[in-house]
Structure formats: structure tokens, C-alpha cells
Amino acid sequence: MNKLRILFFFFLFGFIAITIRLFYIQVISPEFYSADYTKTSRIEPNRGRIFDRNHDPIALNQTKYRLFVEPKKVEDRDYLIQLLEDELKMDEATLEARIDMSKDWVAIQSNLDKETKEKLESYDLKDFGFEQEQQRYYPEASLAAHLVGFLGKDSDSESIGYFGIEGFYDKDLTGLPGVLKSERDMFGRPIFSGNQERVEAEDGRDIVLTIDKSVQQIIKEHLKKGVERFKAKSGCVIAADPATMELLGLVCLPDFDPEHYFEFTEGDFINWTISSVYEPGSTFKPLIVAAAIEEGLVKPNDLFNEKGPVKIGNYTIRNWDDKYDGKITITHILEKSSNVGMVYIGSKLGKEKMHEYISKYGFGSKTQIDLQGESSGQIKPLSAWYPIDEATMPFGQGISVTGIQLVRAFASLINGGNLMRPHVVKEVQEGDKVKIREPEVQKKVLSEKTSHTIKNMLVSVVNNAEAKWHMPEGYTFGGKTGTAQIAVKGSYDISKTIASFIGFAPAEDPAFLMLVVIQEPESSSWGSETAAPLFFEIAEDLLIYLNVQPS
């Protein structure tokens, strides 16, 4: 009887203990304990792909693998380290540091290909495993590096786009992650009869660019040869459709490999054409001439008496060659790139109107191009202008612009007077939905009549240039050279120049507008002897590729 009573109380005590424990788990602290039996996993979306205008791939994804080790399951640590050292070519000390026996899980190496994964799996060890991960793949390597940017890591080791398209359209390309919630037992194993919640990931959007891969290749091959030939520090080329401001190609050298971005410095990633500013020099002159024509202050055949240098206070303004031709037309001022003539045109326009047109052309504000890292450039507020500013601004000194700003403003000279928003994305694709980017007129700067007039004057500038360039036969070109000294600590360094040429072809219906910039060339400092010849070399191949027939 006593034994039965003892057994009864034993079971009663156990029952009460279990009841109290269950009450604590289910009523007092259910959140803490239920979390132990629910595992939440993140389902990664596929990053959107990037294509050129002909749907040739520029940026894709490829499957890679991350090798991990579970140290507490390792039976022979020395053997495992030796194996990984041989197969992965990793340092023994690094492996010893990573395989921390006090941890449950450690990552060893990422970005492994399928062949390496299968080779390691052939050893049939239970010590390690693999996680699938996506890596960005750029099949054309550095062909469009400054335009596309790259996929890197943030401070939390999460993938994020930097610079160019990868940076500007990062949210579109990234997509939305999914979630998988599943109930687990106390050992972490799935409960097959338990609840499962799955929200599928939403893949990133694909992007189709306005650029043409073949145009990129043509530009890059010629630019590379040009930079080497002129012994230049660097160079950039932008080619665009002046009617829409779709970019057809954009190359800057030196560039970088987006897959191995970690081997380069931050300065290598900067897209000079949108992020850096410079004084445009004589390529700025047609913009001021067009403004004066628009205001009815000058006509192409009006005469100006070019007597000699001009004194402005303590400053003397001379022509680049210090030659003066007496009575010349406004068109000839552009043809010979007369600084003195431009001072005259600027005085006719006046500083208020000049400042107004410079702002209307979009200088001093961002173009809103869809690339990460754009600079707004700089123009002085009108209240800060001195007489020398009013005199030098017409020939492109005292103002800081970006390459893309100059191209956009120049396009308005030859497209009927429209300031267009430059863009590099043609379509955004989400499944079966396609969003097409339409050309956007930001403002009307000039009349059709003024645009037609200045375009003809720019054709005359090329046809009557002192330098005789090799131009493809059967085509008409318009354009303007520029040579700007680089300002260093408040003064100009005569040994350092930025040589440039901006031009278009064919003149009657331009297929492209192109800016060529050569920075600090050693062979010659003049745009007419460096940037201009390179422009015509590139233009010849572009006209053939774009199937533009001679007139």
C-alpha cells in the first residue's frame, strides 16, 4: 500500500511539474519558445540583366558556390586543411584561422565555380558543404565599364550597385527577396506536418540600354590608339543622337574591369564625362554666337574689325595665334576661333543675357542623365561677375562644365533648338511588361531658324578650318575644336591642356553628335591636332557601321 502511495505521489508530482512547465511555455512566454521551432529563410531574387540596344548582353548573372565548414563535425582538422590548401591554393595560416573549432559554421571561400565544387565533393567528406550564390558576370569585360558601373558589397556584405547603371538603377535591378517560414523540431529538422509559409522572390527588372556594343568597340579601339599616339594622360568620347539625346556610346580611358573592381582604386570608377568638370574653351563659342543670333544682335555675314588684342582692365586678351585679320564676318570669327571676335559678340549680348542663355543651355545644373555620380558644374552668380568674366566667358573661360552638359547644349544648336534630357536606358522590362523611355524635351532654347543658321556656320567652320583633316568623302561635317588650359591653384598651367573636338555628321540630318576629349596630350596641346583627327577617324567607322549613305 505504501509503495502504491509513493508511486502515486511520484506520478502526481511529475504531472504537476509538466503542467506548470507547459503553462509557462504556452502562456507566460510563448514568443520566446515558439521562435525556437520556426525557421525563417530568405529567398534571394535574381538580379536584373543589362543589354545593349540590340539585346546583346552587357551584364548577366552566373551561379557560383560558397564553401563552408562545420568545425564541430570535423574528424581530422589537419587533413581538411591540407586538402583545402591544395585544391583552393589558399594559405595554410588563413585556413587555420578560419576553421575555428568553437564555431558551428564558418565560411571558407566564395565565388567557386561548378568544377571546383564537384572536385571537392568527390572526396565525400561530411566536414563541409556548399551554398549556392549568384555573381555578376560582364561578358564584355571593361567595354562599357564607366557607363555600367559594377555590383559590389556594402558594409553589411550585401550586394549593391555602384556607379553608372548598376548604381542608378540598383532598386530596379535588385528585385524583392522572398521568405520561407517552416516549423522545426527541437533538433532543427523540418516537421513535415507543420506549417509552411512561402512568399516567392520577385526578380529584378531587365534593362535595355541605348548604347550599341559595336559603337562602343569602335570608339574604344580608336580612343586607345589616340591616347597612346598623343601620349595623353586620359581621354573620353561621348556619341549621342542629337535629336533625342540617346547615348550611342560612351568610353573613358583608362577604365577598369567591373568583375575585379576590388583591384582598382575609387578614382578609377569616376566617369569623367558626367562627374568631372573642366573649362570647355573654344567648343563653347558656338553657344554664345547662337544666343546673339537668337536675340537679333548679329548675323552670320555682319562685319567685325579685328584690329588687335583687347584690353579689359589690367588684362589683355589675344587670339590663340596672336594674328588679327581686320574686317571679318561673324562666321569667320568661328572659323578662325577668334577670342577677340568673341569678346565683341559677348559685349553685344551683355552679361545679363549671356548669363540667361548659359543657364538656359543647362550649365550649372545637372542634366538628369540616368547615371550615378553626376556633377552640376559651376557658373558664377551674375552678381559676382567682373568685366573680365564678361569678356572671357564667350570663349569658354571662367565656367566649369561636364562633358555631358556640353553635348546636350550643343545638340540644341543642331536639332531645332530643343534641350533634351540625355539618357542611356531605352527600355525597362519586368516579365512581359516593357516600359519604353521616350525622348524628353526639357526646354526650348533656340528657334528653328537660329538652329538652322548656326548649323550652317558650324559646317563652314569645318570646311574652312586652317587644319586640313582627313574626312570621309561624300559626307558633310560640322563642329568646333577647343583647347583649354587647366587651372591649377588659381592660375593656368600652360603645359597642361584639355584638347577637344565636338562635331556631327552628316550635317543635313545628323546620325550622331560626338565629343572627343584628350586630357594633357604631350605630342601637341591643340585640339585641332589631336582630338579633331581622332574624331574623324571614329566618325568614318561609325558612318559605315550605321549604314549612312554618302550624299
Image (cartoon, helix red, strand yellow):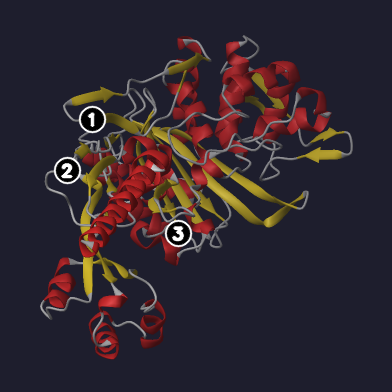
Residue at numbered disc 3? 254
Residue at numbered disc 2? 194
The answer to which image quadrant residue 522 occupies is bottom right
Residue at numbered disc 1? 430
**What quarter of the picture does the C terminus occupy?**
top left
Q: Give the vertical position of 509 relative to 265 (above or below).
A: above
- Residue found farthest to the front: 1
Decide which of 520, 456 is in the foreground and name it: 520
Q: Secondary structure at mark 1?
A: strand
Q: Which kind of residue does numbered mark 3 sit on?
A: Pro
Q: Is residue 339 visible?
A: yes
- Residue 120: x and y in percent read 17, 77
The residue at the point 36 percent across, 34 percent down is: 424
Decide which of 202, 429 is in the foreground and name it: 202
Q: Which kind of residue does numbered mark 1 sit on?
A: Glu
Q: Which kind of residue does numbered mark 2 sit on?
A: Gly
**What quarter of the picture does the N terminus occupy?**
bottom left
Of marks 2 and 1, the one in the foreground: 2
Of marks 3 and 2, the one in the foreground: 2
The residue at the point 36 percent across, 87 percent down is: 92
Does residue 531 appear left or right of residue 63 in this picture?
Answer: right
